[in-house]
C-alpha cells in the first residue's frame, strides 16, 4: 500500500505519516512535506524519484505527471487499466493526503497584491484531489486534518470502509468547489475600470463581483418549511461569524423548526444590537416587545408588558446570561425558543421540566471594526424568480451626533434617549414600521402595513390592549412621513417627540405640523425599510 502526502498546512501530517509507516504503508511525498518526514526519521520517497522528472518552475510542476495520476486514476477492477500500469511501470497510489495553497487566507490579508493572490492558486493539488476522489473505490483522499484519526483507526481495524471512502470523496469535491468559488469570487471582483492592476498593486475590489458563488453547509434537515406542505433544511456559511445564530448551541428542547430559526434570528439580531441588558420578544419575525433594564429580569418584565398576547408562543432573546430570577418569570409563559448568552444552573433547572422548550446559548462576538468581527452579515440576499438580489446589509448604527433637530421645540435629554431606543427597535420591525417607546421599553409596535397610518393605529390599539398609555412617548418611523397626516396620527396617540429619516419633498409641511402641535422632531437622514 502506498500513500502520497503533499500538504501546505502541515498540521497533524507528521503524526499521520508515523501511523501509516507503522502500518507498513510506503510513503511518497513532495517538497517541504518530504523534508519534514525525512528530518523526523521516516522513510520517504520523493515524487521526483517516482516520476523520473525533477520538480521544476519553482515547484509548480512536480505531481502533474502520468506516474502520479495514472496511479491515482487506474481502476483496480479494470484489467486493461492494470495492464497499462504494468506496461508503463506505474505503481498504484492507495491513499492521497493533500491540502491546498492557502488562497482564501492570502486574499483576506490587508495589502494582498494580485501577484500574491495568483501565486496562491494551487494547480497540482486540486488535480490530484480530483483524480483520487473520482477513483474513490480504490483511493482514499484526505483533504483535512480532522479526517486523519478516523482513517488510521479504520486501517488498524482492517481497512477503510466503502462508506468512508465515498464520504472522503464527497468532502474532497466539496473542498475543490469551495476553493474554486473563492478564486472566482476574488478574480471577478477585481476592478478593471482603469485596466488590469499591476502585479505588485493591491487591486481595487468591486463590492459585488461579476460572478457570485455561494457555498453553504447543511446543519440539519427540518420537518417542514414555513408550512407543512413545504420541505426545508437549515444551512450555514462556510465560515460563520462569531456570535451569529448558526454558532448557537441548543441545550434542550425539541428540534428547531423553519419558523423557529427565522424568528430566532430576528430576535437575536435585534437584542445583540444593545450594549446594556436587553430583552427582545419576537412573533412572526417582528419584535412585539423590546426593553432594556438593569438586568435580564427587569428587561424581560418591561418587554413582556408591551404585548402579552403576541408574546404567547414567541421567541425570547437576552443579550446577557439568564439567571434563576429571570427564568422564574419567563417560565410562566409559553415560549418556543429562549436565547441567551448563557444559562445559570438555576435557570437550567427551572426549565428542565419544560422539555419541549428550546434553550439556545449563543456567545456574543468579541467585536471589532468589520461587520464580520461584530457577528453581522456583510451582504443580504433575497431570492427572486430565477435570480438573486444582493445588497450590503443594513448595519448602520445611529449616534446622538447624527440627529438633526428640525423643530422649534428641543427634545430633552431623556427624550433623546427614548428616541434613539425607538429608532434602534424600528430598524428590526417590518415596514411600514411605527414604534412608540418610553423609559427604555416599547409601548406600542405597528408593523407590516401598507399604510404608515395603519401601522400607527395598530400600535395604539396594541398599547390599549396591554393597558399601556402612549402619552408622553417617543415615536419612531422607519421612513419619512410623506404628508402631515402621519405626524398627526402619532401625536394624537400621545407622542411628544418624533424620530424619522426626513427627505420628503413635503418635509417642511411635516415640520410645520410638528411645530403647530408642540412636539419635538429629529431627522436621522437614514431610512430602514425592512420588507
Image: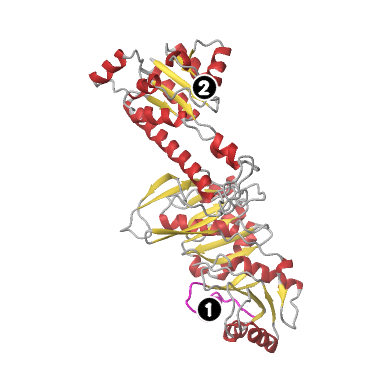
**Residue 432 makes an appearance in the image:** yes
Q: Is residue 459 above or below residue 155?
A: below
- Per the image, label 1 sits on a secondary structure element best described as helix
Q: Is residue 322 above or below residue 83?
A: below
**Residue at the image point whose x is 51% and y is 35% from the top:** 121
Please check the rendered image and state whether residue 449 is part of the magenta-colored stretch, yes or no: yes
Position of residue 518 measured from the top left corner of the image (x, y, whole percent): 70, 86
Please check the rendered image and state whether residue 192 is part of the magenta-colored stretch, yes or no: no
In this figure, what is the number of numbered marks? 2
- Name the residue tied to disc 2: 56
**Residue 440 makes an appearance in the image:** no
Within-10-Å neighbours for mark 2: few <14, some 14–19, many 20+: few
What number is the disc on residue 452?
Answer: 1
Q: Is residue 36 above or below residue 409?
A: above
Query: Hey, which quadrant is residue 525 in on the image?
Result: bottom right
Position of residue 513 measured from the top left corner of the image (x, y, whole percent): 65, 87
User: Tags 2 and 1 in contact by the CB under 8 Å rule?
Assistant: no
Within-10-Å neighbours for mark 1: few <14, some 14–19, many 20+: many
Magenta region: 447-471
196 or 475: nearer the viewer: 196
Q: Colour scheme of this structure image?
A: secondary structure
What number is the disc on residue 100?
Answer: none
40 or 157: nearer the viewer: 40
| Quadrant of the image containing the N terminus | top left
**Residue at the image point whose x is 56% and y is 57% from the top:** 269
Position of residue 68 measured from the top left corner of the image (x, y, whole percent): 40, 21
Q: CA distance from mark 2 to mark 1?
A: 69 Å
In the picture, measured across the screen, residue 501 lies left or right of residue 229, that is: right
Position of residue 335 measured from the top left corner of the image (x, y, whole percent): 48, 58
462 or 92: nearer the viewer: 92
- Per the image, label 2 sits on a secondary structure element best described as loop
Which mark lies nearer to you, 2 or 1? 2
Amino acid at each position: 500500500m502506498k500513500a502520497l502526502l503533499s500538504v501546505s498546512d502541515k498540521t497533524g501530517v507528521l503524526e499521520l505519516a508515523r501511523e501509516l509507516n507503522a502500518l507498513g504503508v510506503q510513503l511518497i511525498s513532495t517538497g517541504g512535506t518530504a523534508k519534514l518526514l525525512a528530518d523526523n526519521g521516516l522513510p520517504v520517497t520523493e515524487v521526483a524519484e517516482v516520476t523520473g522528472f525533477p520538480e521544476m518552475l519553482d515547484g509548480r510542476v512536480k505531481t502533474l505527471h502520468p506516474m502520479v495520476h495514472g496511479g491515482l486514476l487506474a481502476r483496480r477492477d479494470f484489467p486493461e487499466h492494470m495492464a497499462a500500469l504494468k506496461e508503463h511501470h506505474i505503481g498504484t497510489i492507495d491513499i492521497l493526503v493533500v491540502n491546498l495553497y492557502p488562497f482564501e487566507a492570502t486574499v483576506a490579508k490587508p495589502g494582498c497584491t494580485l501577484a500574491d493572490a495568483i501565486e496562491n492558486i494551487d494547480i497540482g493539488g486540486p488535480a490530484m484531489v480530483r483524480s483520487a476522489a473520482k477513483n474513490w473505490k480504490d483511493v482514499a483522499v484526505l483533504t483535512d486534518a480532522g479526517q486523519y484519526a478516523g482513517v488510521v483507526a479504520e486501517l488498524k481495524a482492517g481497512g477503510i470502509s466503502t462508506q468512508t471512502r465515498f464520504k472522503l470523496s464527497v468532502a474532497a469535491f466539496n473542498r475543490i468547489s469551495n476553493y474554486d468559488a473563492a478564486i472566482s469570487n476574488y478574480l471577478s471582483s477585481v476592478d478593471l475600470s482603469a485596466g488590469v492592476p499591476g502585479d505588485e498593486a493591491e487591486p481595487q475590489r468591486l463590492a459585488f463581483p461579476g460572478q457570485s458563488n455561494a457555498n453553504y453547509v447543511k446543519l440539519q434537515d427540518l420537518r417542514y418549511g414555513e408550512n407543512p406542505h413545504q420541505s426545508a433544511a437549515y444551512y450555514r456559511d462556510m465560515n460563520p461569524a462569531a456570535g451569529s445564530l448558526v454558532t448557537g448551541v441548543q441545550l434542550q428542547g425539541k428540534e428547531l423548526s423553519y419558523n423557529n430559526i427565522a424568528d430566532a434570528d430576528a430576535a437575536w439580531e435585534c437584542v445583540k444590537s444593545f450594549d446594556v441588558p436587553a430583552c427582545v420578544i419576537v412573533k412572526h419575525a417582528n419584535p412585539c416587545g423590546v426593553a432594556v433594564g438593569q438586568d435580564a429580569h427587569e428587561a424581560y418584565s418591561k418587554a413582556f408588558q408591551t404585548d402579552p398576547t403576541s408574546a404567547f408562543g414567541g421567541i425570547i432573546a437576552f443579550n446577557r446570561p439568564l439567571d434563576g430570577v429571570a427564568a422564574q418569570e419567563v417560565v410562566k409563559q409559553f415560549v418556543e425558543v429562549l436565547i441567551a448568552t448563557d444559562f445559570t444552573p438555576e435557570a437550567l433547572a427551572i426549565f428542565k421540566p419544560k422539555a419541549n422548550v428550546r434553550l439556545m446559548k449563543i456567545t456574543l462576538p468579541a467585536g471589532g471594526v468589520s461587520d464580520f468581527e461584530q457577528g453581522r452579515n456583510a451582504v443580504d440576499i433575497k431570492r427572486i424568480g430565477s435570480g438573486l438580489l444582493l445588497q450590503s446589509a443594513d448595519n448602520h448604527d445611529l449616534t446622538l451626533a447624527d440627529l438633526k433637530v428640525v423643530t422649534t421645540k428641543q427634545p430633552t435629554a431623556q427624550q433623546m434617549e427614548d428616541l434613539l431606543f425607538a429608532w434602534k427597535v424600528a430598524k428590526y420591525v417590518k415596514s411600514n414600521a411605527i414604534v412608540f417607546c418610553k423609559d427604555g421599553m416599547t409601548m406600542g409596535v405597528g408593523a407590516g402595513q401598507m399604510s404608515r397610518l395603519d401601522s400607527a393605529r395598530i400600535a395604539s390599539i396594541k398599547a390599549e390592549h396591554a393597558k399601556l398609555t402612549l402619552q408622553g412617548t417617543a415615536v419612531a418611523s422607519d421612513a419619512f412621513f410623506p404628508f402631515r397626516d402621519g405626524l398627526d396620527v402619532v401625536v394624537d396617540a400621545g407622542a411628544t417627540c418624533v424620530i424619522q429619516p426626513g427627505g420628503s419633498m413635503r418635509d417642511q409641511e411635516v415640520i410645520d405640523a410638528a411645530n403647530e402641535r408642540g412636539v419635538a422632531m429629529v431627522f436621522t437622514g437614514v431610512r430602514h425599510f425592512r420588507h
